[in-house]
Image (cartoon, rainbow, N blue to C red):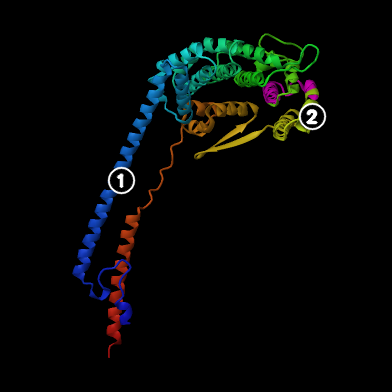
Amino acid sequence: MPGKRGRRGKYGGKRAEFTSDEDSVNNDAYSDASGQSDNRSMLEDANDNEVDEIAQQEAFEEKLKEAIDGLSQKSAKGRTICFNGVEKIFAIKYIPDFVEDRKMTITDSVERGLKKGRGEEQSTAARLSTLLCVQLGAFDSAETISRDLKSTIFFIANDNTASANARAECCWALGMNQFLSGNDATDTMEIAQLLSSIFAGSYLKGNGAIANISTDVAALHVAAISSWTLLLTVMTSADIYNLLASDKTNSYMPSLNRLRELLESPHLDVRLSAGEALAVIFELGRDFSCDYEQDWALDLVEILRDLATDSNKYRAKKDRKQQRANFRDILRYIEEDVVPEMHVKFGQEVLYLEGWCARTQYNACCRLLGPGINIHLAENQLLREIFHLGNKVLPIPSVQKTSKLERTLMNAAAFKARTIQRNKNRDKRSAAMAP
């Protein structure tokens, strides 16, 4: 079998039959040296990666500092761009310590943007005020900032001369800031009263006619209804039971009959937000009394069933599909007391949402944070407390993959040991076969 014995190995080198012990020692020393060199290379790569991460973090912070400094520039367009930039970063990054050090600068800029800005600048400033509370939720300063900005945001939300979009964002900011930073009963009632007075524009007119409002005004009413509903989720069941009744209206809450009128709105989003508000009210009311408004619910079921089976061709196909899906869930809850459930998977965890209150809170956070919701659920202690997720879960350390060079050296060493062993066996076999 001389042909096989004279074949070169996979990685080249001397022929197997000429390998001596001295050569093996030298080659082993060479392999050890190569391994040490490779280890040093890997350590250097790790250090380089660490340096790169530090450099990237410094570059990111420098960029954010520039955007924060730009919030006070003279150009309204430039300020709006910077508001948008800071807003996007706050939504996808959780950097509470960085924000805590600059909270006064950002708060002053937000207040100035709300007071002196117009339209889009006021909208972005209002959203940034809420994101500021999200970032600072772990600190007491969030409550202070919310309280300091409340009067300005309250004024714009109630200002008929302001743009509908800016007023809508201020309605969201009022509800979200109160939800995130504190649940003072007096402030909650005051904000709820303002919001209910805003979406009252979508009630039926005195003669029973449907209110004719523009798309922008409808969006304002949707924001007011949704924000009002969010505030209901932080009230006690007893408060809801006492404040809401089908036969009367108080200064804080509209009656259930009034809320039912919103289901006849020609605007889809108004109908959807009104339906979710009624579901939350019934959930809280039933927590206090199992037969909450049972007689009144019988009339509501007929309206909900019509909406859940609506096939009117004058509505867009997509709108009909969304309306039927939402109102089927609401009808199932009002009629059969079937509570909706949602499972949200993020990282190594799963968030279980049971009931309309939990869904309302989660949807409000999703609207604010967008794709960054998963990052904040995993890292933001405030949101973890709101959704009862407990302490932050440490990531499981990933097993470092073997580098290509390391695999090559390991394969070469294994091939060499295998070749030496085979050569010894071949020598013994040749001696046994000799005459």
Q: Amino acid at mark 1?
A: Asp
Residue 270 quadrant = top right
The quadrant in which the N terminus is found is bottom left
The tag on residue 306 is 2
Tell me if residue 297 is in the magenta stretch. yes
Where is residue 31 drawn, in percent x and y? 25, 60
Prevailing secondary structure class for the magenta stretch in the rendered image: helix
Residue, x 75% and y 11% (percent of image)? 248
The tag on residue 333 is none
The quadrant in which the C terminus is found is bottom left
Give the residue furthest to the bottom. 435
Residue 282 quadrant = top right
How far apart are labels 1 and 2 at the CA level? 65 Å
The tag on residue 45 is 1
Residues 315 and 87: in front is: 315
Tell me if residue 69 is in the magenta stretch. no
Say left or right for 194 vs 142.
right
